[in-house]
Image (spheres, helix red, strand yellow):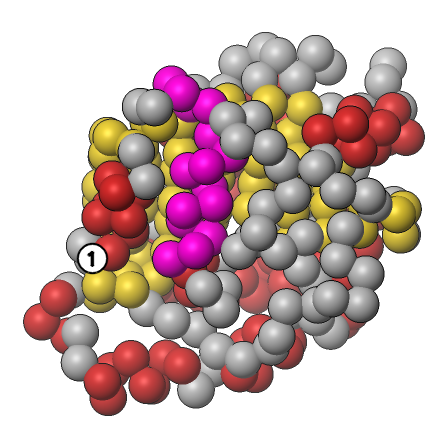
Amino acid sequence: MITTQASRQRIAELLDTESTVVDGYLDVLGANTPPIKGIGQAAMRVPLVSRIYEPIWRKFFRLAMGSNAVGVRREKQRAVDSLGITEGALVLDVGCGPGLFTRAFGTAAGESGLAIGLDASESMLAEAARTNATGSVGFVRGDAGRLPFADKTFDAVACFFALHFFPDAEGALAEIARVTAPGGRIAVTALAHPELLDFPLFRRTYQLSGARSLAHHVVPDLLTAAGCEITGRKSSGAVQFVTAVKTA
């Protein structure tokens, strides 16, 4: 069986910058923590929140998704299927939180593959490394707006329920496309709203919490502009799920 130390070594070889091991994950940020905007983002960096995040998060997004919400097992399997993860795949989970989905990706990729979860929160990553690191799963503290990997590295890249917290969602999507290999799959789930609600007061209401709801066209348009072909686009309540394939 491959050890978690071995998985960290494999990840370190993929990074395009130096890293240090902290609480079981690799840190490339050090003191250069991305800025916090709003109480929602601040909460993500509190250790207690990291421990209770999964049950709270899941209840909130089941409400946000309305009648189309599914159970945990189906949700993870749907994520794996949307990315087409097979044995030996190299997968990146951007905004991984405590790593529940990252571990599912690593299980699908097998011992010859590798799933890497990336987040900016030390407390989330400490929890992820404690509960979800395996021989094919490891974690990196990094900035979604500047992913620490070379172009065309990954067979699949996911960003589930995190894009709305990034200071630069547009830049993060461009980075996701950049590190995806040609033919690789991308899956993004984010808070989204119909274009008719895209007015300043609506956007400001979300921003007070540090979150940002995107108009329905934003994620598909940005991925298309970054060299991807949209393969799926579905809205469920206040949540949008978009899948794409990198074409170049």
User: Is residue 213 found inside the magenta-colored segment of the image?
Assistant: no
Quarter of the figure with residue 53: bottom right
Q: Is residue 131 visible?
A: no
Instruction: Give the position of the N terminus as an image quadrant.
Output: top right
Residue beneath the point at 37% across and 79% down: 206
174 relative position to 234: left or right: right
Q: Which residue is mark 1?
A: 216
> Where residue 199 appears, x then y in whole percent?
17, 80
Q: Which residues are magenta?
A: 170-184
Q: Secondary structure at mark 1?
A: loop
Out of 112 and 108, give the one closest to the viewer.
112
In the image, what residue type sits under mark 1? His
Quarter of the figure with residue 202: bottom left
> Where residue 213 appears, x then y in whole percent?
32, 68
Dot 1 alpha-carbon crowd within 10 angstroms: few under 14, some 14 to 19, many 20 or more: many
Residue lying at the far left of the rendered structure: 196
Out of 141 and 153, give the one closest to the viewer.
153
| Looking at the image, residue 116 lies above or below residue 119 | above
Residue beneath the point at 62% across and 56% down: 143
Residue beneath the point at 53% across and 62% down: 57
Out of 179 and 139, give the one closest to the viewer.
179
Q: Is residue 221 visible?
A: yes
189 relative position to 40: left or right: left
> Where residue 243 appears, x then y in whole percent?
31, 36
> Where residue 47 appears, x then y in whole percent?
78, 69
